[in-house]
Amino acid sequence: MRKQNMNRDWIATARTLSEALPYMQRYSGAVVVVKFGGNAMGDDEAMAEFARDIVLMRQVGIHPVVVHGGGPMINELLNKLGIESRFVRGKRVTTRETVEVVEMVLSGLVNKRIVQAINDAGGRAVGISGKDDDLMVCEADDPELGFVGRPVEMNVQIIRDLYSAGLIPVIAPVATGMEDNETFNVNGDTAAGAIAGALKADRLLLLTDVSGVKDASGEVVTQMTPEQVRGMIADGTIAGGMIPKTETALKAVEEGVRAVVILDGRVPNASLLELFTEHGAGSLIRSTEPRVKPRGLRQGGSGL
């Protein structure tokens, strides 16, 4: 009986790989920006699983670009240092003292942990920040927030150079100021959207701690146009922390990203489910409707 069960598992695995082939072919050579954050970052097993997913993407010809956050780790170190964390409209108030801690955690601890996980999984990752080669130049987003930046100039050639060389860029969201070279903390979703837009990426995957954008009845909406998103924001269906994520998605689509997907990063292999299966995962936002299957090739096929 045990052998029969194992055989069924192997057959199911082989069938899954075979069914994924058209989607792998569809994405060969594509640029996929993945925003990694949330609770998965603090779990060793989840981190290792994420790293394997990224390495698999690279192995089948995708150019993955990882942008990460690190809020819980920043909070932990600030608490240890006795520095109070304050938030305005959901964004961290970043003083001159705080931004030094933010850079240390994001560019050091978090970035190198993700790089190591990808390398341990057989990939070749390189960690950089938005300050390297002036990748991301910012101005102050809001005087109330202090050193929180809004990207105004993107120089993404360093990313292209890295993935063209077979490397996986892992990017910490800290940036250089436009006027006086100050360091700015940039929201991870905002940074990922700006990078994806500058690269004209095929996909931006925003991994979150929720299953996607939900309608008034609480059901996840699997496909949305920008007009639908704006309507749901206006009528209050999209609220709270989902507003900045959907606004990031709208801006990325406007800047040339083919589609943005908001999906639950806690689900095992969420990125692979989105890219390589007929069902997909989460909520996909794009300005055009698919021209082939209404759902089957919405993410993975030639429906763009």
Image (cartoon, rainbow, N blue to C red):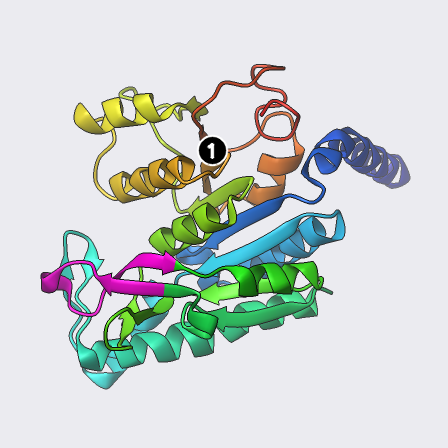
Residue 113 pos. (x, y %):
53, 72
Viewport quadrant of the C terminus: top right
Q: Give the range drawn in magenta.
A: 137-153
- Is 56 displayed left or right of 89 in the figure? right
108 relative to 154, above or below:
below
For disc 1, the marked residue is 282
Q: How many marks?
A: 1
Examine the image and state in which quarter residue 152 appears: bottom left
Name the residue rendered at 56%, 42% in the picture.
270
Name the residue rendered at 58%, 36% in the picture.
274
Name the residue rendered at 49%, 44% in the picture.
205
- Is 86 displayed left or right of 294 in the figure? left
Is 152 colored magenta in this rendering?
yes
Viewport quadrant of the N terminus: top right
Is 299 colored magenta in this rendering?
no
Q: Is residue 229 visible?
A: yes
